[in-house]
Image (spheres, rainbow, N blue to C red):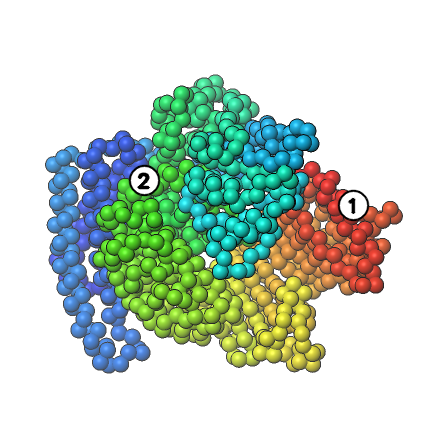
Amino acid sequence: MEVLTRLLPKLAELLVAEYNLQKGVKGGIIFLQAELESMKAVFEKVSKTPAEQLDEQDKIWARAVRELSYHIEDRVDTFMVHCQGSKPARQHGFKKVVDKSLDFPKIRHKIATDIRDIKCRVEEVGKRRDRYKIGGVAANTATITIDPRLLGQCKLATELVGIHEARDELINILIGGDEVPMKQGKIVSIVGFGGIGKTTLANAVYEKISSQFKCRAFVSVSQNPDMKKLFKRILHNLGKSINDETLDAGGLMNELTEFLRDKRYFIVVDDIWDIQVLEVLRCALPHHNSGYRIVVTTRILNIAERAGVVYKMKPLSIHNSKILFYGRIFGNEGPEKCHDEMLNKVSDKILKKCAGVPLAIITIASLLASKGRNEMSWFEVHKSIGIGLENNFELDNMRKILSLSYYDLPSHLKTCLLYLSLFPEDYKSEKDRLIWLWIAEGFIHCGKEQGKSLFEVGESYFNDLINRSLIQHTCSYDGITDYCVLHDMVLDLIHPLSREELFVTILNDSNHRSPLTTIRRLSIRSGKIAQVTIGDIKSKQQVRSVVAFPPVVDQMPSLRSFKVLRVLDLQDCDLSQGCSLEYLGNLFHLRYLGLNNTNISELPQEIGNLPILETLDVRNNKKLSSLPTTVVQLKHLMCLCVDEDTRVPNRIRSLTSLEKLSWLHLHIEEDSIDIIEDLGLLTELRVLDIVLSTKWNREESWDFRYGTGRGDLSAWQACLPQVTSGVLKVVELLGKLQKIQSLEIRVKTSRRCSIGGFDVRIAPLNLRTLRIKGACWFLKLPAWINSSHILDPSILTIAVKELKQGDLKILGMLPSLRYLDLMVDRSCFGINGRFIIGAGLFPRMVHCELWGFVRPVVFQKGAMPMLTELVFDLCMWRWEEIAGSDGGFDFGMGNLPSLKYVQVNFEYRRSTSWGLEEARAAMRHAAEIHPN
């Protein structure tokens, strides 16, 4: 379906005068347009019907149309790419212009031949449809709209509804009884099918009792674990750093055994699929009388029985199922919102079929949330679920439940979800990377999304999949980077669908002997794939995407074997040995090149030959000192990601399609400051990250938080005008780059400097992220940082010399602010009272850092209700000013109901360290009495 959607506009583009096609060829294209439009309409109905309900002839016809569409797109794209390469350019000599002009008639002749061949194939498919009367499939074409209030409810509901009773029961099994059993070790296994909440329960137990153990860890295993990586994760979580890369799995196992010897530890091992893995872990974890506790989760009963005491997961009760079900549909108003007797009756029937499985309940409730109070729609959902859940719950029935949401997706979301089958189980996919991949594959279409970029449309796709509970959203520790993971049951659903449609081919140890048929997208996941399989790949000319995962790079075929490759993503694969980028410049169809963390030291100059490259990601490659100058020839480049120390060539003004540039390092005195003027011409930029430095201080040691480093005052004064000029030029950019949504500026100087120019300028309305690090300070909170000037800021990192109580209130009224890193200049304050965050302020704040305040900021009840992480510092040389008359203090940490993590940095001088222990004791007491 997705290929037909993007193919039709391409055929229309061929009809424009630029391609100068013959009249007969144009007639053939018009015929193809009409035929493919009709096929698309029938294909859309087929795609909305579950596979088990389709007639076999329908499946055959759909497969033929899909493969024919891919073939047509390959031919059309090849023609367009060749035409772009044949256009004379000013930099070419006269002979090259003549050669290209002579090539163009050959290219037109080839497309004419291709169109005639394709027309015959399309006619045959149409006749076959008529002969066997294919295309009579009926499907529900209702548009789905998910209530936006449901965002963010999934995690809260699944973790809390009905979990407390099971948690307390399991805790009693683990640590209940008298003191004698506590000195003995114990292993408890949680067993149940996917989606019933094993991991949620294990995590609830871990959060409740882990503080009672000095050594503790929570690790996930998955189906095909790398034991070396698994042991490293366990040791890391236990606080044991292993820097010796020569240790194999056996050596790491010995390290783990020795580290835990005679220690009282608590370890949760989540999602074990293989008895051998369990036995290896049992050998690695010492069994002694120090009171260790181990919790194992698995779907497989014999593994649970082999592990130890078995705790069988119980489904949610009818009461808790209703709380979860109605809460997902109607939000916080819950069951009281549903007063319709008929809806209550059908709800009871649906919940009976869901059998108390949280994943099934959430999935169906998300589907019903889009149906409103349409009684017939609810009954249709009930009838579609299938039978058998009342007596036996099997994986096939769960797939049927999940497939309801899948088949209810619009075609573009189906494609985006299926694409996640490229990634291994439990893989955390970075949101931005995933969206740029979707764009490169052609899955994102502007359509009616007027005024939005492709990336912004892709963000809406991403959020819609989260809203429908088909992908799970997670964040980095600081809440800045977004990721998604697939629930294992959703992965079980999409894998067979992906195989059926030949959408993704997976190569790993378990299936390398399977016959390779048509390959469109290739996911390589093992370094032990047989060479015969790699040879088969080399012979395939239709591979569009290659996504590899370490350590497979030694098995990668030569790049020149891929003729129509659009996506090449080798993130985290070591390219320093084995894989060559020699033929990279020949991949004329390439749109996405992902070389993040691949240990490369250079890119070939031929990268400039890639006429339609859209994404170039070369982050985390320390040896890559600069990009080739030919990068500026990539006119279609939308996303350029490099390390902050990787030099970007001049003349970037030609990259007019660029939407994301991260990072751009400007060496001020080397005239690269002129690049800033080029930036002003890149009006499509949404994300811009800049580092400003001088030659004098580039080799110094820097603290970006305080803007401090080594260096003498006179040298700093000499470079200050250049730094100021550079910053002010960046400030001027804001007036030109009105699409900017994320701006980060780092300035390297050895002294603090003011950026007063920012104080008086208005930021773009759509600014969501502003991070200014290093030595630059606002004189005061800029007037434009408020909800009336910037519409939806969510991340803010700034340093302000003078902050007032009213300024803190202004920040607190930003409705979407979820991350705040705020530094003030304590030398400007004196001791005039405390700053107070009142009730209702910072309603969405999740992560907050406060630096430089003379006294701790006080949190009143109702402030920051969603805050989970708090970081701040205390000045110990002003302890008497901080502490109350009793030597302690209370800044309202108990008023933060969601708080889980607190970090306090104590700043003291040797002469005033006498209050340090008192301060630490006060903080420990505040943490101990907090309910979390």
- Residue, disc 2: 496
Closer to the camera: disc 2 or disc 1? 2
Residue visible at 23% across and 77% down in the picture: 97
Mark 1 element type: loop
Q: Position of residue 699 (x, y in %)?
A: 59, 75
Residue 862 circle label:
none
Q: Quadrant of residue 395?
A: top left
Dot 2 amino acid type: Pro
> Which residue is at a point 35% across and 25% down the rendered structure image?
386
3D distance between C-alphas at marks 2 and 1: 57 Å
Instruction: Identify the residue at horizontal 25%, vertical 40% (top origin).
Output: 43
> Residue 78: percent from the left, percent from the top?
23, 61
The residue singled out by tag 1 in the image is 890
Along the line of sight, which residue is nearer the eye, 2 or 571?
571
- Circle 2 crowding by C-alpha within 10 Å: few under 14, some 14–19, many from 20: few
Q: Is residue 812 visible?
A: no
Q: What secondary structure is found at the residue carrying circle 2?
A: helix
